[in-house]
Image (cartoon, rainbow, N blue to C red):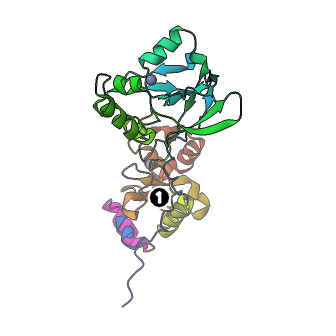
């Protein structure tokens, strides 16, 4: 025995509309194209710090962070004197500073601060210019006043010379930047508002909605309506997301509605101001109840 075509059978359709049964049984056989979403951009990389090694800076552009470290252009830096000169045959190799220490405060008050440069090197090597010659990579020690200022490894100036030397030689800019990161910005979340999954239509939404309308033979699924629109009138037929999530395109979340029934869904009254809504109502007023 051949089963009747439930969609086309006039007697079944009139029975269905008399008992106001929805066309929901169609959904059992609905097969839709898989939604395709725009590939999400990977999370943005952490902010890139442009190296500022050996950059001449005005004293005014260096500030002290509340934790005592030195800030230039929104990041933690080390600073040191770059240009050194012989003084009676003796060259004083400068120390580098990690903190707004006593030495810097004195330098500042004597107006000598502009001789400093900022650095971010992690290996303890700095560019030093001797007697106006070319820059030379030089290993520098950390300033002891800075160590005391930050109480680095428990450093204080009244310690024995050996204990102080031990802490100085153990100090490395790498460890310093581990404790006091260069970037003052907090860790970037995995997804920003720009890359988070969004409630939006899949890229092939036109294909999905076209396919649903076709498989439902251009009929409104609203109980009590069921208006049949031919393919030419399919623009009066909308595909509505029951849970309002435009990215949830499972057949059970989709319902095919004429524009009249769609406009009656919660929060959809804006549809009534569309020109095609007015056209639709004037065209089909007699056959439907909107
Ligand atoms: Zn210092
Ligand atoms: Zn809708
Ligand atoms: Zn309808």
Q: Residue 113 falls in which quadrant of the image? A: top right
What residue is pinned by disc 1? 227
Give me the residue at 50% from left, 61% from top: 228
Q: Is mark 1 within 8 Å of ligand 3?
A: yes
Quick check: is 16 in the magenta stretch? Answer: yes
Residue range of the region highlighted in magenta in the rendering: 7-23
- What is the secondary structure assignment of the residue under circle 1? loop
Q: Is residue 74 visible?
A: no
Q: Nearer the viewer, residue 63 or 147?
A: 147
Relative to 184, does residue 43 appear above or below in the rendering? below
Return the x and y of residue 123 as percentages of the image width and height.
Answer: 49, 43
Give me the residue at 36% from left, 91% from top: 1
Q: Residue 50 falls in which quadrant of the image? A: top right
Q: Nearer the viewer, residue 194 or 245?
A: 194
Q: Is residue 88 visible?
A: yes
Report the side of 182 relative to 85 (left or right): left
Return the x and y of residue 280 as percentages of the image width and height.
Answer: 55, 48
């Amino acid at each position: 025995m051949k089963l009747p075509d439930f969609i086309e059978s006039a007697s079944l359709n009139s029975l269905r509309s008399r008992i106001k049964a929805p066309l929901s049984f169609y959904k059992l056989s609905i097969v839709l194209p898989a939604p395709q979403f725009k590939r999400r951009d990977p999370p943005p990389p952490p902010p890139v710090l442009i190296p500022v090694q050996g950059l001449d800076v005005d004293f005014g552009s260096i500030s002290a962070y509340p934790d005592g470290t030195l800030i230039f252009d929104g990041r933690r830096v080390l600073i040191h004197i770059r240009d050194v000169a012989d003084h009676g045959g003796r060259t004083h190799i400068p120390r580098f500073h990690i903190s707004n220490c006593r030495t810097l405060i004195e330098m500042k008050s004597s107006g000598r601060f502009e001789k400093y440069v900022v650095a971010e090197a992690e290996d303890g090597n700095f560019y030093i210019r001797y007697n106006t010659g070319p820059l030379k990579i030089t290993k520098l020690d950390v300033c002891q006043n800075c160590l005391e200022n930050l109480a680095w490894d428990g450093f204080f100036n009244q310690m024995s010379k050996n204990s102080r030397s031990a802490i100085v030689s153990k100090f490395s800019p790498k460890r310093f930047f581990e404790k006091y990161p260069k970037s003052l910005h907090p860790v970037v979340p995995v997804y920003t508002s720009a890359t988070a999954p969004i409630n939006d239509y899949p890229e092939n939404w036109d294909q999905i909605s076209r396919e649903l309308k076709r498989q439902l033979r251009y009929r409104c699924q609203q109980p009590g309506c069921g208006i049949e629109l031919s393919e030419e009138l399919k623009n009066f037929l909308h595909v509505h997301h029951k849970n309002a999530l435009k990215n949830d395109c499972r057949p059970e979340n989709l319902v095919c509605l004429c524009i009249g029934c769609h406009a009656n869904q919660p929060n959809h009254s804006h549809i009534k101001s569309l020109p095609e809504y007015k056209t639709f109502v004037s065209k089909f007023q007699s056959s439907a109840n909107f």
